[in-house]
């Protein structure tokens, strides 16, 4: 009788083992911290900052095989300020991303807090990480619509080099004037990859008041030619009441240099709603990998503001030094990024 019980227990264990093997949960993280010496002409500061190339984070991801090529998936990702140990994204626990959904042969559908499709265009075609220290787009772009709460996201599989993303965010407004439509967002993008060439177009809209919707447009392309890679990213912002109108252009070149890589990045923003408020910038950054998981980097940037502009030089999450209108900030940095 004891033998039968033992054999039965072993059989149940073997039957359960494949199901366990088909589910997985993993933890991951990234620490990026850097020293920043910045000046505006009248003010100078040396600061330890968090998030030069990428925002520091701690996350959990998992999946469960449902059979038939389908999986349940989830992601929880918390932003961390390494300089003071606090939470990023305004103190949200999982402020970077938080979602769950299904992955199928016809695409992934998830619900929660997401990056918008527009965001992926910016980080793909600003080379060297995109929206990182050294990218003009991170200095000039309004980042507030790039993460969307209360949203449903769809990502298609890659079909003949084309991938489509779409997102809808419910405003869920119950207190702001203008009714429940205020705060709603939607975004979509289409990307094409073929060999060494890649291109993408994206659009995003945000309802800010009952009478106004902001519209964001982006187009990017990159070419790998010889040993170097060239990226071009163009953006435009418009709204219904002509309060926020600008155009942006970023051109970046990524060149292998020794074991590491040199990023050369130039950019410009043209403000069409405020006179004499344009700006342009040149950034240089060198990344040197110490291992597969650890990279050290250093860089210098020079930004020129017109009389009515006050843009600063910031990292992915590291803040810019406060700039008065017309001042021309400068920045020197040295940092380290480690993934685990």
Image: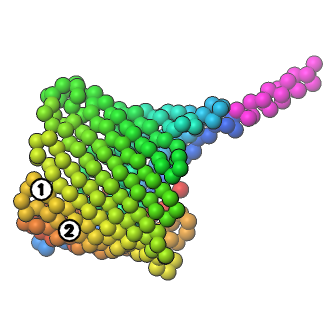
Residue 178 is drawn in which quadrant?
top left
Res 176 visible = yes
Q: Is residue 150 left or right of residue 280?
A: right
Left or right side of 242 for 130: right
The residue positioned 40% from the left and 69% from the top of the image is: 230
Q: Residue at x 10, y 67 (%)?
A: 306
| Residue at the outermost top position | 1
Residue 287 at least partly seen: no
Please tell me which residue lies in front, 6 or 51. Answer: 51
> Would you name the residue on which mark 2 appears?
280
Q: Residue at x 30, y 74 (%)?
A: 300
In the rendered image, which quarter is residue 71 located in?
A: top right
Which mark is drawn over residue 272? 1
For mark 1, does the 10 Å Cα neighbourhood hold few (<14), some (14 to 19), or many (20 or more) residues?
A: some
Residue 16 on the magenta segment:
yes
User: Is disc 2 surrounded by few (<14), some (14 to 19) or many (20+) residues within 10 Å?
Assistant: many
- The secondary structure type at the circle numbered 1 is loop
Residue 104 sits in quarter: top right
Q: Nearer the viewer, mark 2 or mark 1?
A: 1
> In the picture provided, is 109 more to the left or to the right than 282?
right
Helix, strand or loop at mark 2: strand
The quarter of the rendered structure image containing the N terminus is top right
The majority secondary structure of the magenta stretch comes to helix
- Give the magenta-colored segment's residue range: 1-19
At a point 53% along the width and 46% down the height, the residue shown is 159
- Give the number of callouts: 2
Label annotation for residue 15: none
Which sits in the foreground, 189 or 322?
Answer: 189
Q: Position of residue 93 (x, y in %)?
A: 38, 40
User: Of the residues under marks 2 and 1, which one precedes in the sequence?
Assistant: 1
């Amino acid at each position: 009788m004891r033998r039968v019980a033992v054999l039965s227990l072993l059989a149940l264990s073997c039957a359960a083992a494949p199901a366990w093997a088909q589910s997985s949960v993993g933890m991951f993280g990234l620490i990026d911290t850097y020293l920043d010496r910045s000046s505006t002409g009248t003010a100078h500061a040396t600061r330890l900052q968090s998030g030069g190339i990428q925002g520091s984070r701690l996350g959990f991801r998992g999946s469960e095989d449902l059979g038939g090529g389908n999986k349940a998936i989830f992601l929880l990702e918390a932003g961390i300020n390494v300089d003071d140990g606090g939470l990023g994204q305004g103190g949200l626990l999982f402020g970077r991303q938080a979602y769950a959904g299904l992955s199928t042969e016809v695409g992934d559908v998830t619900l929660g807090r997401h990056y918008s499709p527009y965001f992926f265009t910016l980080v793909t075609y600003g080379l060297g990480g995109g929206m990182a220290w050294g990218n003009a787009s991170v200095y000039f772009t309004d980042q507030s619509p790039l993460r969307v709460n209360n949203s449903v996201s769809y990502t298609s599989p890659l079909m003949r080099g084309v991938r489509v993303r779409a997102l809808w965010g419910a405003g869920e407004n119950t207190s702001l004037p203008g009714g429940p439509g205020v705060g709603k967002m939607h975004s979509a993008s289409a990307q094409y990859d073929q060999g060494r060439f890649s291109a993408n177009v994206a659009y995003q809209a945000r309802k800010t008041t009952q009478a106004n919707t902001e519209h964001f447009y982006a187009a990017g392309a990159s070419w790998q030619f010889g040993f170097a890679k060239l990226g071009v990213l163009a953006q435009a912002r418009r709204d219904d009441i002509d309060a926020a109108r600008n155009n942006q252009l970023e051109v970046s070149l990524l060149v292998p240099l020794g074991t590491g890589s040199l990023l050369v990045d130039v950019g410009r923003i043209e403000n069409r709603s405020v006179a004499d408020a344009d700006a342009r910038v040149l950034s240089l950054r060198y990344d040197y990998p110490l291992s597969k998981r650890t990279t050290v980097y250093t860089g210098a940037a020079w930004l020129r503001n017109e009389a009515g502009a006050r843009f600063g030089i910031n990292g992915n999450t590291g803040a810019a030094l406060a700039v008065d209108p017309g001042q021309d900030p400068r920045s020197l940095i040295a940092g380290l990024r480690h993934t685990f």
